[in-house]
Image (cartoon, grey):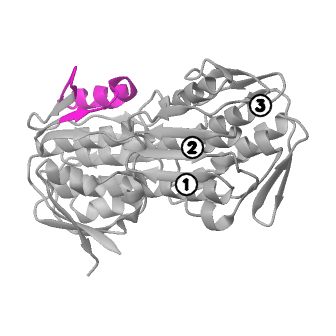
Amino acid sequence: MDEILIKGGVPLNGEVKISGAKNAALPMLAATLLAGGAFTFENVPALKDIETIGHLLADLGADVCSEPGTIRIDTSGVNRHEAPYDLVRKMRASVLVLGPLLARLKRARVSLPGGCAIGARPINMHLEGLSRLGAEIKLEHGYVEASADKLVGAEIFFDIPTVTGTENLMTAAVLAEGTTVLRNAAREPEIVALADMLNRMGADVRDAGSPVITIQGVNALKPVSSRIIPDRIEAGTYMIAAALTGGSILLTDAEPDHLKPVIHKLREAGVSVSINDRGIEVRGNGPVKSVDIKTLPYPGFPTDMQAQFMVLMSVSSGLSIISETVFENRFIHVSELRRMGADITISGNHAMIKGAARLSGAPVMATDLRASASLVLAGLVADGTTRISRIYHLDRGYESMEEKFSRLGACIERVAAG
């Protein structure tokens, strides 16, 4: 198993190209199940999760062909309706095939995804919504079994905004009879990207990106070509890297409109962020000011940026408070940051961070995807050497992270575990 080795204290400078967003690609790839034919996707990141959903689509009968940056999927041969445990257990987003399979084949059998390191993340709202559309839902032997002679539009209210729930219900409703209204829907850019793809396929999805999405069912859809939007979380991670190391990084292929809360908080912390026709330029300007953040569903501050921002606050000039309102266990990276000298106190869903003059390199262990990124960031600014184990989490969500940081001047390498 590989590890990442970092010698910190080097300012990062240069350009970094932001990859396509995994969280946009996964639901779009799953949506190919809605129609038979040949789909093409560009700007696809080379990640483990993308590989996993490709294996799942192939297992369902699709022909999947991958090359750098591009995936071609022919769904003409899709004839199986079961997503088995051995594939779903590798990635909870596999549950995104539930809606499309039910809409096209009138039945689906998908292994329950279970929990993950950052919380339980149940799919009850997915199932309640599908039931409202007329599906019969059974939970047996660790699987969701859904069937329907036909799906009929309905009004569905989410107790809390759910990204994958909104995506699953959107893809089920596009082939339902009549009108479906999703209330308190998730508003993320990835939702808008999926809706755009569905509409180009012939669907009628309106007001995606707002709390109320209206879907008029159609009889059939057609395959299309799509380009994956930039990864706003990867972009935010490199923005914080520039601020941490006192360097200057130009992010190309990033979308500033998707990063407004991150940009706002960085500027509040005294970091220079400028937007021009080449991209987003971030420069560290000396001491970082302490600021408070509260994670919220989009368009609030993203929970997927909380761990990275905590590292920045760990070397700030004062006291800051981070409140996590989205996931119940998303402070599990704190113990590892403490090993590197961070002064962090946890009380419920609040973290109080007292800025330190420096962090110190240490052997640490990654616990989830964004926690892994936070440890890399901490290693980049820490004195001495940091060794990060269990980096397979990083490979699920960051394309070639060590190579990109190395090109920016970081002393970072992937090594075999000793």
Q: Where residue 213 appears, x then y in whole percent?
A: 66, 22
| Left or right position of 46 against 250 | right
Quarter of the view holding residue 288: top left
Q: Determine the residue located farthest toward the right in the rendered image.
A: 149
Q: Is residue 219 visible?
A: yes
Q: Which residue is mark 3?
A: 175
Residue drawn at x 68%, y 55% is 61
418 or 339: nearer the eye? 418
Q: CA distance from mark 1 to mark 2?
A: 8 Å
Q: Which residue is mark 1?
A: 54
User: Range of the magenta residues?
Assistant: 250-279
Of the numbered discs 3 and 2, the one sitting upstream in the chain is: 2
Quarter of the view holding residue 85: bottom right
Q: Amino acid at mark 2?
A: Leu
Disc number for residue 352: none
Of the numbered discs 1 and 2, the one sitting upstream in the chain is: 2
- Secondary structure under the numbered disc 3 in the rendered image: loop
Q: Where residue 38 appears, x then y in whole percent?
A: 60, 40
Residue density around tag 3, few if under 14, some if 14–19, many if 20 or more, within 10 Å? many
Q: Amino acid at mark 1?
A: Gly
In the rendered image of this protein, does residue 120 appear above or below residue 387? above
- Mark 1 touches mark 3? (CB < 8 Å): no
Residue drawn at x 23%, y 37% is 290
Q: Which residue is mark 2?
A: 29
Q: CA distance from mark 1 to mark 3?
A: 23 Å
Residue density around tag 1, few if under 14, some if 14–19, many if 20 or more, within 10 Å? many
